[in-house]
Amino acid sequence: MRIFKTIDISASALTAHRLWLDVIADNLANVNTTRTPEGGPYRRKMVIFESREKLFPEEVGFSFPPFPRSVPEFEGEGVRVKEIVEDPTPPRLVYDPNHPDADKQGYVAYPNVNVVREMVDMISASRAYEANLMTINTTRSMFMNALEIIRG
């Protein structure tokens, strides 16, 4: 049934956007972290999304669904997080010679996290999450109305 495919697609987006929100929260929590176990300041993390059709059939080793489908028919299968990468932007340097992590010139390398950008990303991720939740609720409502019509 296509109704379950619609819910599955929106559910994949809910999962992906929830992870994006978690990464944003991690970035905001570390906005002033100047020392990490790896050395140096915290590096902003970014989420890379990809279409979910790449899950089948190559990676799994069988065709799903069991009948052959052409590539254009795989459009709209959902979304997944491909990877979480570090932002290559250089750290923000602030002159503070009294800071324990200051270099010889007195500069401290702060994370490359921009709070305004993170807030904009948070709003985008929240709105996308809400839109997919609304899609699931609308689909469920349409399905329930269809059942009422069938029941008579």
Image (cartoon, rainbow, N blue to C red):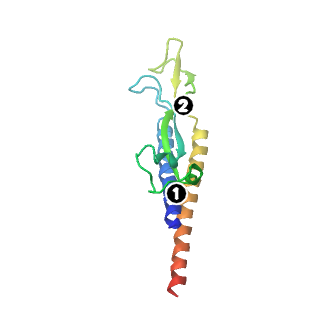
Looking at the image, the residue that sits furthest to the top is 104
Spot occupied by residue 55 in the image (x, y as percentages of width and height): 46, 47
C-beta proximity under 8 Å, tags 1 and 2: no
Element at badge 1? helix
The residue at 53%/43% (across/down) is 49
List x then y, in percent, for residue 84. Answer: 48, 37
How far is the residue under mark 1 from the one under mark 2?
A: 28 Å
Q: State whether residue 100 is above or below residue 52.
A: above
Secondary-structure class at tag 2: loop
Mark 1: amino acid? Ile
Q: Where residue 82 is drawn, which disc sits there?
A: none
- Identified at 53% across, 65% down, the residue is 2
Is 63 or 7 nearer to us in this picture?
63
Against 62, residue 105 (above or below) is above
Pointer 1 residue: 9
| Label at residue 87 | 2
Position in image of residue 11 (x %, y %) = 49, 57
Is residue 127 in view?
A: yes
**Picture coordinates of residue 86, whole percent (x, y):** 50, 31
Q: Label 2 is placed on what type of residue?
A: Asp
Instruction: Please report whichever mark, 1 or 2, sits nearer to the chain's N-terminal start.
Output: 1
For residue 126, say whether it is visible.
no
